[in-house]
Amino acid sequence: MASSIVVSSPGKVLMAGGYLVLDSAYSGVVVSTSSRFYSVVQPASAGESGVRPIQITVRSPQFVGATWVYNVNINGGNVVVQQQDVSGPKNKFVQLAIERTLALAVETNGVDSVIDTLSNSLVITILGDNDFYSQRAQLSARNLEPTLASLSRLPPFLHTGVPISQVHKTGLGSSAALITSLVSALLLHLKVIPSDSFDTEIPSEGRKLAHNLAQYVHCLAQGKVGSGFDVSAAAFGSQLYTRFDPEVIQGLMNDAVAPGSLKNVLSPSNKDWNHKAIPFQLPPQVRLMLADVDAGSDTPSLVGKVLRWRKDNAEEARTLWNTIDRYNQTLSKMLLRLSSLATESPEAYKKAVKYLSTIQSVQWLAYPGFPEQERVVVETFVEVRDATEGIRAHMREMGTLSDVPIEPPEQTQLLNTCVSIAGVIGGGVPGAGGYDAVWLLALEPIDCPAPEQPCARVQSVWAQYTALSVSPLLASESTAKGVRVEKWDAVPGLKEAMGQA
Ligand SMILES: Nc1ncnc2c1ncn2[C@@H]1O[C@H](COP(=O)(O)OP(=O)(O)OP(=O)(O)O)[C@@H](O)[C@H]1O
Ligand SMILES: C[C@@](O)(CCOP(=O)(O)O)CC(=O)O
């Protein structure tokens, strides 16, 4: 597999900033997840060399009927990618990613270079970690409890048993992670960006180009320019995200683009890309926990209704948005402060975490005798807790005012139960909210046996919760900074999964 390229991108959780992040006056707290999407690009086997037109075959072996064969026509500077079987199921995301990446490659390296690189045609395999899709059925088929231990016993990249259109997604941002890994792998294969583009933590020009291209393709495939926090997390990792002005790509939002029109717009030196991605991380010994919630009710489309209410009630909305923004900013600042405190006074931090992990957060300030350094750590954790509760209260208000279930009563009950568990800092509904998911921050003290960890208590509450079906996701925060190149043999189960159909 010497000439194959494997590139992965993380999923995301928008912990704070849902709806606000659509407006560049506000930002969102985005955590990238350890669950990733993988794109494997391989030249087709030697026998297929010189096939004309050039063919690109894309397979998603976790799904039924998920193979797409594309013909690539490069005429002058014009690139057209067409599905061979016009009556077969379409994958707009994949098709546009290939077409626009090839068009950018032609602009950058010239027609001959691209045709030469593609002379053997290509096979691309796409695989998503199990977390991107609900594993309830897989767990119950194996008589396994919905726990992290059970999930880690499932084989990686499980077959879902259904076509993509029928899969139950968990909200981790599959399309953004897919597009980002796919365009990045193709940019590397076509030598549009240098092979070390994803090796550095400080974003290289190559990483920035991959981000801009992925944003563009994702918007085009979705048929709208969203805030883009999911693609930004897939490209750069956990961050405080401020959106870009949609104007930057407006001129390219067409079925076809004129030859030569992508490079200047998508270039990292184009100042019209005015998004901000300030690196963010959770503090040490704090674990992000996620759960897929099945409330028996679908989350209706919330965004349109909330934005309409905001437009019709501008003054009230401004006050509410600004209040939520203050809590969001406090949340991110206090979490970053905890990281600094952990570096400055590691012993005090460790002791404070150990102590707090055994107590409900409402009691955290009850003990008056903390030495100074520990007291500062405890108070900062309390500020994080208060910020999460403030965000929840005001997001509920947003939901009530705009008449959408941002944190519906079923979720309120569940979250109240979760945040009263000893050692849980706080939680909320990710992104736009609704019935589908919750996130929690739980303390994870070192030198504490697994069964005594807050995380274990949370899992047993989830497993016994009867008002809703709560199924954990394996993901925690990703420490890697976004998209990266993988060693072919280092991803457990990847080779085996590529063989399944
Ligand atoms: N494994 C995959 N292989 C190929 N295409 C995929 C795969 N997973 C997702 N896609 C593409 O992404 C589309 C789903 O995008 P959509 O924007 O609806 O989901 P999403 O909002 O990213 O989902 P979620 O956040 O719940 O993961 C699919 O229709 C398909 O085109
Ligand atoms: C409502 C919104 O702010 C967040 C949606 O987030 P999610 O896809 O529910 O994680 C929309 C957006 O930012 O694109």
Image (cartoon, rainbow, N blue to C red):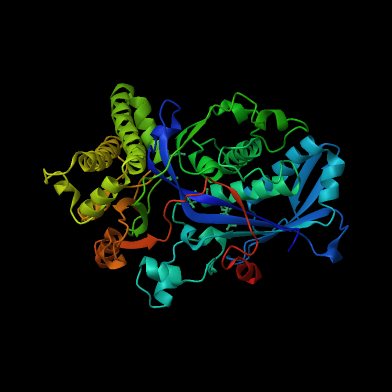
- In front of the other: 325 or 347: 347
Q: Is residue 385 above or below residue 276?
A: below
Residue 401, can we see it?
yes
Q: Taking the image as four quarters, which one is ligand 2 found in?
A: top left
Q: Total number of numbered labels? A: 0
- In front of the other: 189 or 16: 189
Q: Position of residue 293 (x, y in %)?
A: 35, 58
Left or right: residue 116 versus residue 496 is right
List the single residue furthest toward the top. Answer: 315
Left or right: residue 10 versus residue 438 is right
Q: Position of residue 76 (x, y in %)?
A: 86, 37
Q: Is residue 195 above or below residue 330?
A: below
Residue for point 56% across, 55% down: 37
- In front of the other: 171 or 15: 15
Q: Position of residue 405 (x, y in %)?
A: 31, 45
Quarter of the picture containing the N terminus is bottom right
Res. 379 image quadrant: top left
Left or right: residue 194 versus residue 493 is right
Residue 413, can we see it?
no
Q: Position of residue 341 (x, y in %)?
A: 32, 40
Residue for point 43% across, 57% down: 475
Quarter of the picture containing the C terminus is bottom right
